[in-house]
Image (cartoon, coloured by chain):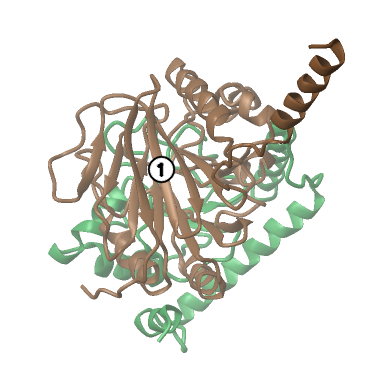
Chain colours: A green, B brown
Amino acid sequence: MCLFLILSLLFPVAADEPPALKQFNERVKAYAELHKKIDSKIDPVDATSSPELLVKQKQQFITALQKARANARQGHIFNRGVRPIFLKILKRELKGPTNTEPRAMVLGEGNPKAKDSPKAPPLKVNGTYPTESPVSTMPPSVLLALPQLPEALEYRFIGRHLILRDTKADIIVDFIMNAAP
Amino acid sequence: MTKTRIVLIAFILFAAVVAQPRAATVPQSDAFRFAVIGDTGTGSSSQEQVAMELAKAWSRFRFGSVLMVGDNLYGKEAPKDFTKKFEQPYRQLLGQGVKFYAALGNHDDAALQKAYKPFNMGGERFYSFKPQPGVRFFALDSNYVDRKQLEWLEKELIASQSDWKILFFHHPLYSSGEKHGSNVELRKMLEPMILIHGVDVVFTGHEHFYERIKPQGGVHYFIVGSSAKLRKGNIANTELTAKGYDQDHTFLVAQIAGDEMTFQTISRKGKIVDSGTIRRAEKRITRK
């Protein structure tokens, strides 16, 4: 049996979503559409040898996205209804003696608040995640357990706080404080 | 002896020499050569020194590709950093048309690097390429192994008919490093596919030393994470190590010819610190 089928059995995508999760998925989808809309208006840069062009395009994208989401606040996507769902999943995946490895992966080296980490990004919706801050390595088991995200977004941790991060702009889109047990 | 006869004899001798078949060289027309570097992006003198040694190795081995196993740029990634931490150190190889293929490390800006043409990532976090018949490489993003990447990898491994399947990514599944050690979480997800779908070799970085791991289920694992960074004395004494070196910076060069991969691991000062031949074999599926 191929691994994909095994994964689907071990980490099934829920057939009947709780309303809070459905709302989360709708908001995430709306964000992805905004991301795509802004991306289409930025001067396209295909794979290039010029870091100047890449950095310029990225900065244009960041500026446009921050402007479009100027009123974004914590909880716009991780709203009150869906936060308990995430906390429950993370407790199941990271707490307890059988989960020491994924927990170490989340909170250990690579987490921008880990010991020896050069710089922790400020936890602020619509704030940028500095390039010089490392990104936390996400345990595959946690990623498979959490609701799936479109390409525009990813989950990461800053300290114990779960963040949604824009994959192109490196902007913090929303966060849940102290999500990791 | 007349002048005519001398000239005739000389001509006959000359013709005999020229017509003599050249000593046969070992045919290497189907050999594929590549190098591996890791955790490079410092812009430091160490990186520069290793890069110079890598260029010297190129003049001997003429590899066409270099795999980068992540942490390709440390710190800021402004345009000048791409110059200082990549283009400048490897200018000789880039000038010779050697292609670099990057995997993402935990210090890398994915959005910038996957679009940066000299890293040959094709705009993707994970990708595969086949530099010549019989050899396929798979670059993974081990920072974020989600369902999408796992499904992609399985599909690609099944589809690949290549004799040699080689993975490279940042976080080692097996490691004797005291700082990080084996990433057991990643291993749980990736190793079943590695074993079932016939992967032969895995290159990683993240640990700032060199380690060749004893074959695990017939698969050969290498950590090549000291091409600019170094943690001296960081290799713990474990059962995993076939060969370890944590006293100086290193890189690896390899050649695949038929069913054999020969490799040398070379230090910053040009010393060969490890070498060997891997023979591609039938894989046994091990269950743990």
Query: Where, by quadrant of the figure, is residue A2 drawn?
Result: bottom left
Which quadrant holds the N terminus of chain B? top right
Q: Residues within 10 Å of mark 1 (few under 14, many from 20)?
A: some
Tell whether B263 sits left or right of A102: right
Tell me the residue at 42%/26% (across/down).
B228
Q: Nearer the viewer, residue A9 or B35?
A: B35
Q: Chain of mark 1?
A: B
Q: Which residue, as the protein is rendered here, is positioned at the far right?
A: B4
* Left or right of residue A36: residue A168: left
Side (left or right) of B220 relative to B64: left
Which image quadrant is residue A85 in?
Answer: bottom left
Residue assigned mark 1: B263
Residue B103 sits above or below residue B193 on the image: above
Query: Which residue is rendered at x = 46% and y = 15% of the image?
Result: B45
Residue B101 on image: x %, y %: 58, 45
Residue A166 picture location, percent across and down: 57, 52
Q: Is residue A108 visible?
A: no
Residue at horizontal 30 percent and vertical 66 percent from the top: B188
Above or below, B36 relative to B268: below
